[in-house]
Each structure stands twice: as C-alpha cells, then as structure tokens.
Amino acid sequence: MNSLATLADQLRRNPALQELEEGTLRALAARLEAVAFAPGEVICREGEVGDRMFLIAAGEVSVLKTGERGEFVEITVLRAGDLAGELSLIGPTVRSATLRARGEAQLWVLSHEACHRLLAEHPPLARALLAHLGRHLRRETSTVARLLAQDADRRFKVVCFDTKPYIEAVFRERNHEHFSLRFIEARLTLETVSLAAGANGVCAFVNDTLDASVLEELSELGVGIVALRCVGYDNVDLAACARHGLAVTRVPTYSPHAVAEHAVALMLTLNRRTHRAHNRVREGNFSLSGLVGFDLYQKTAGIIGTGQIGQCTLRILAGFGCRLLAYDLYPNPALTAETGVQFVPLPDLLARADIVSVHAPLTPQSRHLINAAAIQQMKPGVMLINTSRGALIDTAALLEGLKSGRIGYAGLDVYEGERPYFFEDHSDRPLADDLLARLTTFNNVLITGHQAFLTREALRNIADTTLANLREFEAGRRGAALTHRVPLPSTPHP
C-alpha cells in the first residue's frame, strides 16, 4: 500500500501520535498489517471486545451506533489518515461503535499482541497516547464549563425530551418566557441523559426511560424535578427518585373528553367500517358488501374504569341510548344517578357487554387485566376498545380471541410493545414486532398510534399543567406541597 516512511508520515498526522520520534513511528508502522475490505463489509462491531487498532489508508469507513430500534445510525466518517480503536494500544476495551467500509477500503491493522510488544519496547508510545487522552478529557471538561459559564440566562432551565413540533409549539406559546426551555427530539435514555447537563428539571413523556441508572445520572447532573407531561408514571422508578431526592410531577388530566371521544370514534369506525368504505370509494368501488354494521342504540356497553375518561365515555354512550355497565374498585353512585350505569363485578360485565372499553390505570394488579381467561368470558363477537395503557391487554390472548372469533372487533390506541414504534415514522422498514405485525393484518382491527389525547385543548392543558408544576417546584414547594406530585416511597434513614 504505502512505504514505511509514507506510513510513518500518515501516523504523525494523527493528534495522538504527532509528537513521537521517527524511530518510534517507524516501529509502529512496521507492525501494522495491511487489510482490504469490500463495500459494506463490517470491520468491527459495537459491543465486542476491541483487540485491534485501525489506521485508514484509503477509502472511507462509517462509524455506526445502534439506535433504540436496532437500526444503524451513522455518527461520522473516517478517511485516510484517521485512527480508530486507539484505546487498544493500552488494553482491550469494549467497542463503542461499529465500523463498516463505505466502499473499497484499505486499512492498516495493529493487533493487541503487537501493541503490547510495542509498548514494552517503546515507552514514548504509551506516554504519547496518555497525553493525547488527557488533552481530550481536559478539552471536553473545559468545553462543558465554557458552555455553562457563557449561559447568561438565569431562568429555571428545563430540557424537554421526546418532543415533536406540535409539543414544542404549544409549550413555547404557553410558557410566556418564564422558563428556559430546550426541546430534544430524542427520547430520554442512558445514552441521551447527558443532554440534561445544566438543567434544573427535565420534562418527560410516556416512552422515556426513567429507570434507576438514568435517574442517578439526572441527580448527578443537578436535576431536581422530573415533570411528566402525561398521566401515567409506570415508566418511572419511584424508589430511585426517592433515593436521589428527585421530585416527580404529572398531568393527572388534560382532556378526558379528547380520549373518550377517540374511544367512541374507534367504536363507530369499526362498527360502520367507514375506513374501509372510504378506501373503496377512492378507488371507484361503491359496493356495500361487507360494510353491514349494527345500531349502538340499546346495545350493552361495559366500561372498565370510571375515572374522568371513563365517565366521559359513559355520558357519550348514554347519548346513543346504550345500556351501560361499569366495573371500578370504587363504584360511583352519583354516576349511576346521572347516566343510569349499573356497577357490576368484572366477570358479569364481560359476560353481558356487546362493547368493552378499557379506561383503567396500569398497575401491577391490572397488568393483562384482559387476558385469555377474561376473553373467554366475553360474548362471541364482542367489540374491545383500549385507549388507556397497552399492557392492560395480553396481546397474544387478543390475537387468539380474534382468530377464534370470540373478539369480533378490536380498536387500539395503545399497545403493550409500542415503545419502539409509536410516535415515529417506520414506513420505510418492516415491523420487527411479530405480534404488532399480525394485528395489522386483521380487517376487524383498527390501530391508532397513541393519538387519543391529541387535540388542541388537550395539548394546551398538558402544557399549562406541566408548566404550573415546574413553577411550584421553582418556588420551593416540595412533597405534598406540589399539587400534582407523584407520591414517592419513603426511604429509610441510614
């Protein structure tokens, strides 16, 4: 490929090696092995133990990281003269990225065994590498310090994760410049938590990761509050929040009407098959075959969970003239007086309802509330609606119920494995989730991507409540003084 002298010159251009003497550079160059890679060939993989250093001699090499959904994301491109895997010079370490040839690529490779011999024979090589790494660490530290020092904005700072343009727009509109808000499209994970550096609080959503490791990092970064812009908090390790003194707030209600109306929209669409009729007419097909529905009037609707959303759903269905059943751990006599709903045990509701709509919170006790046994208790051909939490329904059991005909219709705005998919565009690749892919093949299943909350009124309420929660925390309120706090478990004193 290159002469020893030319290769030594290439090595000198790298910051890690530029101060080495000619003899040390030539000794390093002499131990490099020439290897050619074909276009698309993987040179090394993320997560494997690195035992080689690479010098790009010709061509280009992609540096790839694995995303949350298993896809490769290109971080940067290495070109002639660039080094990769320098840490192999001082010992094996786990690869943090995948290297893949973009086209024909030629590399010089230095094995870990050869590194050890070099380091023993040429101590300046180890000193040069350590000096380079030290400069790198100092530079990164000073960069962070500079960024924090030049931030003249003294307002309470909040980093909002997993945001979309419609979220950013409404938060900016309702913020009135009170907080310094930064919007991040990426979800909060252990890989992205460092983006909260310098923030007083973070604003998170249903699919953000708030486990013990992420919460520990948030605490180390000085974050004091996790402001959830959603109702549920089953993705939050509350015990870890208590250990680290992190406050957690939520939006207990934003628009129960929005979710209830979406649930009824799923019922009407499935029943009258308006989605299928629309597609037919667009193709010039005005046939009515296969579009026969039923009257909602006098049908029995069973509502599981009579919180605010369940109550709104009952009132809408009462307007259709439905017979109403409800199951809740705490029956509401006032609701019975208003709508005529009859509170019954869950098995009774499942056995009598033509339509079952789930509006319960997700808890360890309610997980897979609708399972194979529950489905067997339902009427043949029942309509099942879920706009609450995906894990309330056992998806495998739902599929069996659809195949057997026990479930005649299913309307889902949530799915228990939704995290890798919902809120993102996956139209350019196949669904890797077998259960979700199978659900989409049924013509009596209607799935929406967790959009029941998505109305202008609901978005404004979410923003207003979240910002109010942050204002309370900024004002010094803690614990029970926070209006919409999530109660944390008590932590024993050491």
Image: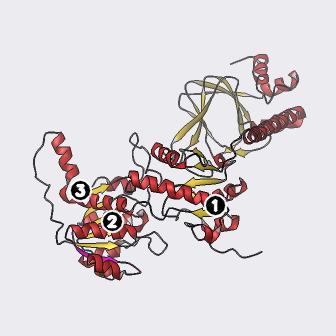
Residue 198 on the magenta segment: no
**Based on the displayed image, in which of its 4 quarters is residue 41 positioned?**
top right
- Residue occupying image coordinates x 60% and y 49%: 178
- Residue occupying image coordinates x 64% and y 69%: 479
- Given this view, does label 1 or label 3 mark the residue nearer the observer? 1
Is 202 positioned to the left or the right of 252 in the image?
right
Q: Secondary structure at mark 2?
A: helix
Q: Earlier in the sequence, mark 2 or mark 3?
A: 3
Q: Amino acid at mark 1?
A: Phe
Name the foreground residue: 352 vs 204: 204
* Residue where numbered disc 3 is placed: 269
Q: Earlier in the sequence, mark 1 or mark 3?
A: 3
Q: CA distance from mark 1 to mark 3?
A: 43 Å
Instruction: Tell me if mark 3 has few (under 14), some (14-19) or many (20+) residues whose alpha carbon lies within 10 angstroms of its own.
Output: some
Instruction: Tell me if mark 1 has few (under 14), some (14-19) or many (20+) residues whose alpha carbon lies within 10 angstroms of its own.
Output: many
* Residue where numbered disc 2 is placed: 398
Is 199 positioned to the left or the right of 249 in the image?
right
Please provide the residue range marked out in magenta: 322-329
